[in-house]
Image (tube, grey):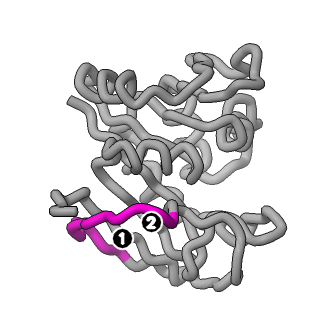
Amino acid sequence: MGRLIYSAITSLDGYVEDAEGHFDWAAPDEEVHAFVNDQERRVGINLYGRRMFEVMSWWENVDLEGEPAAIRDYAEIWRAADKIVYSRTLDKASTARTRIERDFDSNAVRGLKETSPRDLSIGGPELAASAIKAGLVDEYHVFLTPVVVGGGKHWLPPDVFLKLELTDQHRFGNGVVHLGFRAAPTDR
């Protein structure tokens, strides 16, 4: 059975993009990228909303010549995974191993988790909010970047209560801190 994993690189104040929609301040260095790659190796299916998919589809055809090892490695990992994109506007997939679904169906995702031999990841805070509210997310990974942006798009929905158990913590040389959590049962 696969676990559903939600990972995000955020500002210290919890935003994945600033008020202008920028996220260049979150670009991982080689050390952070290698760590992310090791986490992503266990993922067989990536679930994306349209906007996150459009950002991530860059990995499909990027020229890797001269790129650092972590970048080349991530491109291979990303290309090897299946992708499901939830979109009402995309007509067809622009990348290999990709299918389009019109609506997020929590029962279908639950079925994917039950039948997948590998883990699944969910990308983008809006799509992740649907999975979080449905109680589908098993693990949370946040990479806190040492910057405060003061507003923008938050990585977690504002209207949920989550009880989590810390499973991992790691400090990187550039000041980024990774915190890993497992969803814990709640009485609420």
Q: Which residue is mark 1?
A: 179
Q: Which mark is residue 159?
A: none
Is 70 placed left or right of 3 in the picture? right
Residue ID at (55%, 81%): 12
x then y, percent, for residue 142:
44, 66
Residue ID at (73%, 14%): 92
Q: Which residue is mark 2?
A: 142
> Label 1 neighbourhood size at 10 Å, few (<14), some (14-19), many (20+)?
some
- Residue closer to the observer: 158 or 184: 158
Above-or-below relation of 46 to 101: below
Where's the N terminus, which quadrant? Answer: top left
Q: Which residues are magenta?
A: 158-170
Q: Amino acid at mark 2?
A: Val
Residue at the limit of the structure toward the right, as seen here = 20
**Whole-number angstrom distance, CA of label 2 to CA of label 1:** 5 Å
Where's the C terminus, which quadrant? Answer: bottom left
Mark 1: secondary structure: strand
x then y, percent, for residue 155:
54, 62
Examine the image and state in which quarter residue 111 appears: top left
- Residue closer to the observer: 180 or 29: 180
Above-or-below relation of 133 to 9: above
x then y, percent, for residue 42:
33, 38
Residue ID at (62%, 21%): 102
Residue ID at (25%, 66%): 163
Examine the image and state in which quarter residue 24 appears: bottom right
Disc 2 and disc 1 in contact, CB within 8 angstroms: yes
